[in-house]
Amino acid sequence: MHHLTDTVPADWEYLSEGGATIVFRYKGPPNPAFEGTVLRLRKCPLYDDTGRRIPKPLEFESCEALADRFGLPLDAPPPAPERPDPTVSFQQEIIAQLIPPAHLPRLEPLETLGGKTKRGPWLETLAEQCDPQRPLERRQTHGIEQVYPTPVLATDLVGGQGIAVEIKPKWGFIPSPTHLSDHTRAVKMRTCRFCMHSHLRTQQGETVAVGYCPLDLYSADESRVKKALAGLWDAWVASDGSVNSFKVFVHGKKISPTEASSVLGIANDLTDPKESLLSALLPVIMRTPVFRTLARLQRTLDPLDIEGVAALLAQAPGPEPFGRLTLRDYRAFLPAYLGATPPADPVRFHVVAYLLSATFKDCSVILRVPDGTATVIDLDEKDPRRMRKWQELDWQIACAYAEVPEAERKLCVDGKGEQ
């Protein structure tokens, strides 16, 4: 296994980040172990629930302070050695049984050889180096996890020659009415979750892709797919590239809308940047099975909607019937989901299914032209302890949209016709 500290922080350049991880691209000297890869590191909050700043590991001045942070007695053994990022095992053992490995990135756990005395300054230097490139709203709330960073090497899917576009497609279906409440049924059966959420976020002052509907992207209808791409492009331009649902990379460099002309001449001879890129992406989307697979997984893993799952959980003993799940839980789930055996515990089955559906609703797809490849990324497992928060958000979204006059509500057409 390769080691993080075989490189120096200057070998890595900031690429992008999501809610849980931050990604760097290797730009160091020739090294077969790292060339053509990105480094993914876990993030951690900078402040606790009370708003108090959490000290960095290098700021601890004594064993007493370190023990206090971890809630350990002074004579307790040190925290267990770090374990590889569970995302690697999750993808290899669970996700790869649901999405063909040809459409998944290569992931490799990376050791942080040298212990905190060596990796602490290494990660601190990397954090200081990348902070000026990070979005302000990200760096104000989260930094690089320096105690257990669980680094992972992955294929650099946006580097090299050509164009790479990262799309976060989101929810691809209208729910079944069976488990919906009388209050939410009318709005949920007409307007998809993404479009309702976009309405709420717009009310809250956010810039969102209001012209984009995921059901168009998943529809396999060429005119609707092009409409979806146009909505994503327009939101990208209107937000000056800040929306997280659409990112464009040209020859390995993330571009802004002001640099849109750099896409010209790569995939076709069209002279309008928008038409050139959309015309190049359209056949890739129409040909790949990735979007059909994601829509099918989302739908079949979430037959009850969060309302139906919440009703099941209300019958389970205890306020928090499920903590974080393990790979064993997912391994036990798959035979029942794939039809080999009936579920032994229906409540647990539907909770695991909903969490997997949430993973596929929140992933991203990287499309490359002219290569014509499609790869699914950001397939992290979800925490069941967030179920209550998701239920509350779902109710807030539906109630806000119910205030829209019925004649003005958006009609989202489910490609499966299962409304």
Image (cartoon, grey):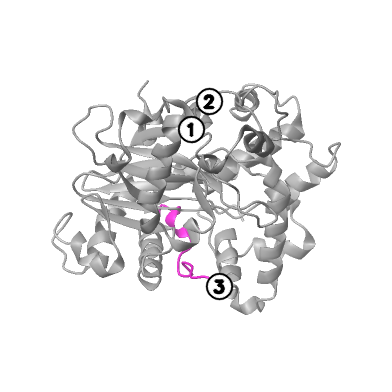
Q: Dividing the picture into quarters, in which one does residue 330 lie? A: top right
Q: Residue furthest front?
A: 61
Range shown magenta:
206-220
Residue 316 tag number: none
Q: Quadrant of the N terminus?
A: top left
Nearest the viewer among 10 and 190 is: 10
Note whether 410 is above or below 301 in the view shown: below
Indicate left or right for 54 with 242 as reference: right
Q: Which residue is mark 3?
A: 202
Label 2: how many Cα within 10 Å (few below 14, some 14–19, many 20+): few
Residues 282 and 252: in front is: 252
Is residue 6 rendered to the left or right of residue 150? left
Question: Of helix, strand and loop, which one carries label 1?
Answer: loop
Kindly report which numbered mark, 3 or 2, lies closer to the viewer in this rendering: 2
Label 3 residue SS: helix
Residue 104: x %, y % from top left: 39, 35
Q: Residue at x 65, y 21 (%)?
A: 77
x and y, in percent, of residue 56 in the image? 54, 44
Quadrant in which the C terminus appears: bottom right
Give the labeled residue for mark 1.
150
Residue that label 2 marks? 83
- Element assignment for label 2: loop
Q: Which numbered disc flags the more N-terminal residue, 3 or 2? A: 2
